[in-house]
Image (cartoon, rainbow, N blue to C red):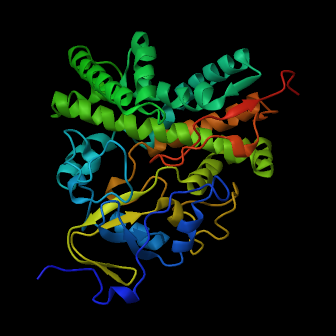
Amino acid sequence: MPYDPTPTDATTVEEPPTLPTDRHTGCPFDPPAALTALSEKPLSRLRYADGHLGWLATGHAAARAVLSDPRFSSRYELMHLPMAMPGLPDELPPAPTGDFLGLDAPEHTRYRRLLTGKFTVRRMRQLAERVAQFTTACLDAMEQAGPTADLVEAFARPVPALMICELLGVPYADRDRFQGQVATLFDQSAGMEARGEAHAAVEAFLSELVTAKRAAPTDDLLSDLTTSALTDEELVGVGGVLLAAGLDTTTNMLGLGTFALLSNPAQLDALRADPTLAEQTVEELLRYLSVADPIPRAALEDVEVAGQLIRAGETVTVSVQAANRDPHRFPDPDRLDIHRKATGHLAFGHGAHQCLGQQLARVEMAVAFPALFARFPTLRLAVPPQEVPLREHATIYGVAALPVTWDEEQP
């Protein structure tokens, strides 16, 4: 007889909540108040968008346990979505070719082995000089056009976009066209039709790029991968994953991170006074903001987590933002503190699927934040904080725009 999670006396049990996403009440950097209320237990029942009765992991230890356990699958077709997402069906299809994020071992391992050596800490730190050059160029243009700007358009988006172009080996002559297509693809305000057209254009561009790299390799990651056993279709898929994983996340960390620091002047002053705190500041911002949330997993068999039995076939949603605010792991978690040792946060996930590009993202932010505040010591919001538009219902949280201003005569 199949397992039925519905209690025999349903009248005695409250209906499980749906995933809270509303941040209108409270601080824009904090998880939704309703999610914080659910975090009293590390693991609790959750009603999914399609009616599935699954689980929500909010405790740091429970989240790590789910993300590191191979009995929880990353395969899209096995998952239920915790919230309705426009443009996606209720039942997800299997991962397209090259999308290793939606695969389990051994298929995932095959891709991961090929890519891990390309994202070492040493190699990513070697890219710091290029990050600094791109950052300086963006700040020069921003200063010249000032003394006001949308920090997202002028800084937070172009810096990681240029680095993705560098990583994939996009020719300079094609970068404006490619970045324009990518900007539309990740623009939450663009219509589904426009974003669909941008997706097709980006895929076609990557296909052309793979063909060009096979014919004439250059010094970049995509060229390196053409020497592997991956097919052209797989290479296009991998390029798309790297683009999706490495651009929107870092863009929103730079935008929302700047907003958070401007809103916490004591922390910003501490960073300005001691630029060696840059890397530590990045780790704390990653913990504090947790822009990539949530992460679903599907149980392949019965598994016990935090004293609860999760049945085979049930989906567990890991709330990264709740886990990174778990007071059992991070004391006084709702306070931004750049002196905190925030190691162990789950902003990049955990386990076999932990973000491959995390070291590049760290380098980008550790270079970009100090450079921004050194160039514009009087940088401040150009609108009241409550008027900063937020990407409330996007999978990657952040600011849709960040209007800033500064004094033309810098001290």
**Which residue corresponds to the image point at 69% horizontal and 25% vertical from the top-left?**
149
The vertical placement of 43 against 96, above or below, is: below
Say which quadrant the C terminus sits in: top right
Quadrant of res 278:
top right
Residue 29 image point, x, y percent:
63, 53
**Which residue corresponds to the image point at 60% horizontal and 72% vertical from the top-left?**
327
**Which residue corresponds to the image point at 73% horizontal and 44% vertical from the top-left?**
385
Residue 165 image point, x, y percent:
42, 24
The vertical placement of 127 against 72, above or below, is: above
Quick one: 331 or 280, which is closer to the camera?
Answer: 331
Task: Residue 220: tell me if it is visible.
Answer: no
Quadrant of res 313:
bottom left
Residue sitting at the far left: 1
The vertical placement of 197 against 253, above or below, is: above
Quick one: 326 or 13, which is closer to the camera?
Answer: 13
> Would residue 65 be found to the left or right of residue 148 on screen?
left
Residue sitting at the far top: 173
Residue 10 image point, x, y percent:
33, 85
Quick one: 202 or 366, which is closer to the camera?
Answer: 202
Task: Residue 216: tell me if it is visible.
Answer: yes
Say which quadrant the N terminus sits in: bottom left
